[in-house]
Image (cartoon, rainbow, N blue to C red):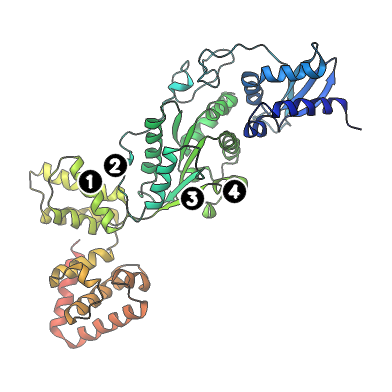
């Protein structure tokens, strides 16, 4: 036979269900457990202090009406709150709190009070006493979509980020996880999303934080016995951007706290943006339940910038800084630095410094001299793009002609020499080299290398070409 108090609570829920949205009911009422009915006091168990405070702020009037309808005017509601002890391994315990007659908040736009008092919440980013609406977003205004150069290497991630920025929490891209190597633009894109949201939705609370900083804040909150403050603060953010989430690997407690924050934000329709150096499937030391949530939305990769994108990045940077620079110098930098955007910009800054300090004009010769020193410090690998440029310049051929299907003798020979150097000087596969040389297959690349070796042994003039080209390529 069904217990009386369970039936009473079931009747209350049926009324509640008709008065709140399906999502709100699932989030705030389904997790509640009814405990007992004694002296006209119905006791319900809620999973956390935050849960209790949310019910009191948003649904107390509705709850009181339903309780009085079922139990009469003397009916009362009491909460049993599950409390966790973070400092030892003891089991969770509960405390009982009766319903209150809390007054409405002074500012209805703020979901919870943020003033620091005896029971206030500590904001880990700003001076105590400020409201939620004054939370600093920690965003760098330079990292905007306007300053983000789009290319084949980042088009998917950029498009997804732009969609999220225009409809935070309202797309299938939640969470949006952006992953890629160092200097590929993850932080820039993630912050651009935040900046765009702040511009279009000024009432939304946006927060950018590195995973490392999040972790240190959590550790501090445990030390200071303010773990609940930490959780409450993050659960009130409308758009949470966590950079380098791979730093959570192996940090079980941090992962656990982030799991609960993630769940709350996702269930309440808030937007989550994450960046990582690898996709979820390759993340080691992460809890499976957290990884599964990372896969809920979209994982978009950023690849190393291609030649055209590198040139566009440099041109945009030079234009923004009001600097005049010969196109051949920009192309030389783009061909020479292939690793990532950060090193590319670093090379540009070094060149500008050389020009300014030595009072020299920015020329190709100065760029070559600077790159020679720069790459010694960065241990850069020669790229296929650069090899092709050197070979095409040497034979006075347009690079588009080398990548075409033409079978003209001089073009075929230049193409074969470029393949030969690409195989000996880079770590690229034969298939990748062929792809760069007009979509040839690996067998064509092998044939080209054999042909060059044979000609070097039999044709002194041809060998002189190759030796001279090797010196030009190694100059950088």
Does 157 sit left or right of 417 as displayed?
Answer: right
Residue 298 vertical placement versus 408 (above, below): above
The percent position of residue 359, horizontal first and vertical second, equals 7, 43
Taking the spot 45% from the left edge, 31% from the top edge, the residue there is: 207
In three-dimensional space, the C-alpha distance between marks 4 and 1, rounded to whole angstroms, equals 39 Å
Circle 1 residues within 10 Å: few <14, some 14–19, many ≥20? some
Q: Which residue is mark 1?
A: 316
Q: Which residue is mark 4?
A: 292
**What is the number of the mark on residue 91?**
none
First reached walking from the N terminus: tag 3 or tag 2: 2
Quadrant hosting residue 466? bottom left
> Compared with residue 470, is residue 279 higher up or lower down, i.e. above or below?
above
N-terminal of the two: label 1 or label 3? Answer: 3
**Which residue is the site of mark 3?**
299
Tell me which corner region of the image, top left, top right, bottom left or bottom right, holds residue 328: bottom left
Per the rendering, the mark at residue 147 is: 2
Q: Earlier in the sequence, mark 4 or mark 2?
A: 2
Residue occupying image coordinates x 45% and y 28%: 204
């Amino acid at each position: 036979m069904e217990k009386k108090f369970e039936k009473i609570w079931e009747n209350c829920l049926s009324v509640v269900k008709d008065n709140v949205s399906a999502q709100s009911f699932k989030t705030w009422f389904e997790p509640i457990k009814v405990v007992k009915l004694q002296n006209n006091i119905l006791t319900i168990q809620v999973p956390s202090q935050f849960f209790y405070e949310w019910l009191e702020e948003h649904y107390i009037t509705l709850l009181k009406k339903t309780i009085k309808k079922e139990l009469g005017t003397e009916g009362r509601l009491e909460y049993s709150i599950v409390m966790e002890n973070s400092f030892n391994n003891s089991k969770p315990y509960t405390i009982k709190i009766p319903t209150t007659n809390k007054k409405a908040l002074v500012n209805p736009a703020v979901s919870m009070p943020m003033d620091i008092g005896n029971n206030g919440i500590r904001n880990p980013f700003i001076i105590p006493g400020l409201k939620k609406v004054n939370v600093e977003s920690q965003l760098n205004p330079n990292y905007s979509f306007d300053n983000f150069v789009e290319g084949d290497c980042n088009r998917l991630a950029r498009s997804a980020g732009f969609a999220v920025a225009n409809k935070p929490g309202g797309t299938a891209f939640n969470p949006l996880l952006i992953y890629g190597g160092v200097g590929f633009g993850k932080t820039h894109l993630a912050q651009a999303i935040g900046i765009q949201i702040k511009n279009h939705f000024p009432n939304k609370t946006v927060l950018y934080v590195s995973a490392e900083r999040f972790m240190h804040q959590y550790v501090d909150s445990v030390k200071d016995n303010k773990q609940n403050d930490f959780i409450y603060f993050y659960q009130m953010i409308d758009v949470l951007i966590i950079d380098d989430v791979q730093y959570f690997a192996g940090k079980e407690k941090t992962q656990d706290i982030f799991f609960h924050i993630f769940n709350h934000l996702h269930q309440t329709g808030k937007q989550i943006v994450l960046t990582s150096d690898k996709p979820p499937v390759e993340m080691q030391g992460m809890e499976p339940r957290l990884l599964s949530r990372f896969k809920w939305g979209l994982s978009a990769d950023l690849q190393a910038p291609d030649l055209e994108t590198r040139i566009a990045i440099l041109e945009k940077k030079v234009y923004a800084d009001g600097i005049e620079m010969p196109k051949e110098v920009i192309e030389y930098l783009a061909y020479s630095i292939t690793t990532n955007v950060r090193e590319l910009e670093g090379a540009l800054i070094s060149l500008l410094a050389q020009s300014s300090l030595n009072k020299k004009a920015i020329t190709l010769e100065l760029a070559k001299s600077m790159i020679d020193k720069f790459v010694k410090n960065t241990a850069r690998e020669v790229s296929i793009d650069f090899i092709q440029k050197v070979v095409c310049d040497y034979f006075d051929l347009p690079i588009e002609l080398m990548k075409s299907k033409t079978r003209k003798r001089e073009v075929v020979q230049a193409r074969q020499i470029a393949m030969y150097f690409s195989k000996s000087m880079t770590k690229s596969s034969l298939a990748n080299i062929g792809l760069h040389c007009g979509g040839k297959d690996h067998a064509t690349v092998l044939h080209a290398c054999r042909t060059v070796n044979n000609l070097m042994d039999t044709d002194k003039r041809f060998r002189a070409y190759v030796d001279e080209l090797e010196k030009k390529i190694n100059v950088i």
